[in-house]
Amino acid sequence: MASENALIYQRIRVRIPKDYHQEPVISRLVSDYGLTVNIKVAILGRDAIGDGWFELDLQGTKAQIQNGLIYLQELDLEVWDDKKISHW
């Protein structure tokens, strides 16, 4: 049985609408939820005018990752986990 404090990884893709460009969404995953975030791919609109897409590797405990995902859902952001990202 894995410890509650065991680190796990989860890969997600998240869309950050242009309305959130001034919000530190990814930074909050680190500072507020204690996650390690590795940006694997970032696609941003020219001059940051459009929405942004990020493919992220999250590392943390199961609870930290779940809480971080809840935070993203509360912001009403589109999030896909690694099970739904077909090219991985």
Image (cartoon, rainbow, N blue to C red):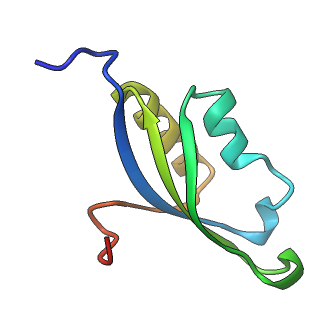
Rendered position, 9 above or below 60: below
How many numbered marks, from 0 up?
A: 0
In the image as oriented, which residue stretches furthest toward the left? 1
Q: Quadrant of the C terminus?
A: bottom left
Find the residue positioned furthest to the bottom.
Answer: 46
* Residue 60, image quadrant: top left
Query: Where does residue 44 sit, x and y in percent of width and height?
Result: 73, 76
For the point 35% across and 27% down, which residue is it?
7
Report x, y in % for residue 20.
77, 59
Task: Look at the picture and state if 79 lies above or below 70.
Answer: below
> Residue 37, image x and y in percent?
56, 43
Q: Residue at left 23%, top 15%?
A: 3
Q: Quadrant of residue 6?
A: top left
Return the x and y of residue 39 as percentages of the image width and height. 59, 56
Quarter containing the N terminus: top left
Residue in the foreground of this view, choosing between 59 and 32: 59
- 36 with respect to 59 (left or right): right
Q: Is residue 16 above or below residue 65?
A: below
Does 32 appear above or below 1? below
Q: Is residue 42 left or right of residue 80?
A: right
Q: Quadrant of residue 9?
A: top left
